[in-house]
Image (cartoon, rainbow, N blue to C red):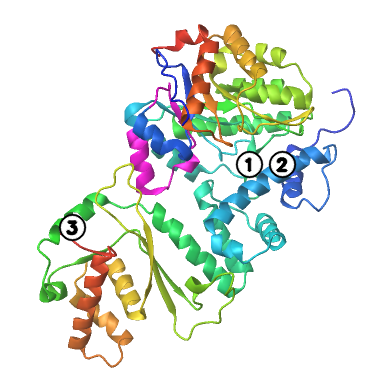
Amino acid sequence: MATNKPSPDWRELQQQWAAAIRAPNQGSLPGVEPRRLAVYQRLVFNNIDSFISRGFPVLRQLHNEQQWQQLIYQFMQQHAAQSPLFADIGREFVAFAQQTLPAVWAQLAQYERMEVDALYAEVDYQLLHATNAAAEPAPSANELLDRVQFRVNPSVQLGVFQYPVQQVSAANPQPPAAAEPVCLVVYRELTSQPHWQQHEAVKFMQLTPLTMVLLETLQQANGSTLRAALASLQPYAVGYQPEQLAQALVTVVEGLMQRCVLFLAPE
Amino acid sequence: MRRAALTPNPIPSLGLGLRREFLDQVLTELPAVAQWEIAPENWMGRGNLAEYQLDYLRDHYPISSHGLSLSIGSQDPLDEAFLLRLKAFLDRFSINRYSEHLSYCSVGGHLYDLLPIPFTEAAAEHVIARVRRVQEIIERPLVLENISYYASAATELDELSFIKRILQGADCELLLDVNNVYVNSINQGYDPHQFICELPSSRLTYGHIAGHHEEAPDLLIDTHGAGVKPAVVELLQLAQQVHGPFAVVLERDFNIPPLGELLNELYELDQQLQPLGEALHGN
């Protein structure tokens, strides 16, 4: 070039652009017409906003336009999103929310994300086919206790919260902390091997702490009998004799099998 | 009820960008298109249903991929873990063509939109080294698209020199987006015909065509949200005359019409591009 100006550093230019896009009210870019910069500010904001608004519909309802816009800009400015995948923008937002939002809303964000994680979970249907075959004929109570092994639906997302996040709504934006931990499961209702047209429903359920620990134990064991899990469950069942607890758990696992949360492992 | 899509004969030379808005209809009706183009970032890690859908599509059509988040021009480190995942994804679905944008979309974290790289020699060197590394990891050519941009970060080089510098330096291919050339020619005030004629024919392997939005007479936005303007079709005709035929995909990402309507637009475009497109049949 004919001018004597030193070449602008491209790295510095990129940083100036990114800063001007993340914080539109904090100045302009030298040599860039404001209405042209505004196109980028709008495109980036709208794109990120659309993913987060869709991913966190309840949280969105609790904010007015201005508050929400401020929250999205805060996310853009304070959180360095590492994932290149668009489906992960929500996960990035949950990480940000833990640092930023009041505890009840941070936990609500976690809960709302569990739905997406259940929807996109990878499931080995061939394995589940084998487990379904193992369920014919239905096992007796004794078999459920001592013989069969269980597998947890791989799409199961477990969450333990201080707040009743499933009750949060515009009418009840900040419920007080619950007396007991709030245990929630979100999962995909797995059908048989899915055809490309078969959209599986995502289900929600509140669990007792005992059922929660049962599912965690079975998840970790990846194929355990109920009897083997009993020892780790006893502390959560104060007042139950071991045999009473065993009978109670048989009823619990029958319910979980019906709801497609638990499967029998192949023998 | 809208009229059904015209049935073209033979199969059109044009492909179409795949959208989930009409995915189920595509899988049910299997309409005639040359190929489908997908964004890997919208399909990776999306669970079993997405995998089954893509397998089914793969059984019936060629698939090309067009990435969004590579951020080839960024100063952030190249995400090699992502590239390995991407390669596994492309291999899994037998997708050979991987194209991306000559842009950056991250600085200290992702912004999830495409920004113009400052056109400097140093930036070109940086991009060249990264393109070479990408091609090494994914074991495929990287096909780079000329992006649309609304505010110039041009400093040392003009856009054309910058693009040519990278294609040659990195030994990679060009995806010519003629709508982007048109949009940029208005926004930046250059001659789109000259721009297209001066591109290196041997690098040009693939093309995009789309509609745009006129925000102001001197500010067009590349929305992919409207029908293709005649001036843009003419640029594609020119490009194929000058550089020989290449595969083209129609992109539509906003204001998406019913599939039948979109296919009719595709078939009409195909007619307009005949007989140039005929050379493409059978490859």
Q: Residue furthest bottom?
A: A239
Please name the amino acid that badge 2 sits on: Tyr
Q: Which residue is drawn at 74% across and 43% down?
A: A17
Q: Where is residue B42 in the image (x, y as percent from the top left)?
A: 48, 42
* The stretch drawn in magenta includes residue A64: no
Q: Is residue A141 visible?
A: yes
C-alpha distance separating marks 2 and 3: 52 Å
Q: Which residue is drawn at 28% across and 51% down?
A: A124
Q: Badge 3 is on which residue?
A: A132
Q: Badge 2 is on which residue?
A: A40
On the picture, is B85 further left or further right than A67?
Answer: left
The correct choice, above or below, for A253 with respect to A127 in the image is below
How packed mark 2 is, by other alpha carbons closer than 10 Å (few <14, some 14-19, many 20 or more), is many
C-alpha distance separating marks 1 and 3: 45 Å
Q: Find out whether the residues at labels 2 and 3 contact each other: C-beta distance under 8 Å.
A: no
Chain letter belonging to callout 3: A
Q: Residue at x 71, y 51 (%)?
A: A22
On the picture, is A219 further left or further right than B197?
Answer: left
The secondary element bearing badge 2 is classed as helix
Q: Find out whether the residues at labels 1 and 2 contact each other: C-beta distance under 8 Å.
A: yes
The quarter of the image holding the C terminus of chain B is: top left
Q: Badge 1 is on which residue?
A: B113
How packed mark 1 is, by other alpha carbons closer than 10 Å (few <14, some 14-19, many 20 or more), is some
- In the rendered image, residues at marks 2 and 3 fall on the same chain: yes
Displayed quadrant of residue B94: top left
Q: Position of residue A241 (x, y in %)?
A: 22, 91
Q: In this picture, which residue range is highlighted in magenta?
A: B31-56
Displayed quadrant of residue A67: bottom right
Q: Where is residue A227 in the image (x, y as percent from the top left)?
A: 18, 77
Please name the amino acid that badge 3 sits on: Asn
The correct choice, above or below, for B100 with respect to B248 in the image is below
Chain letter belonging to callout 1: B
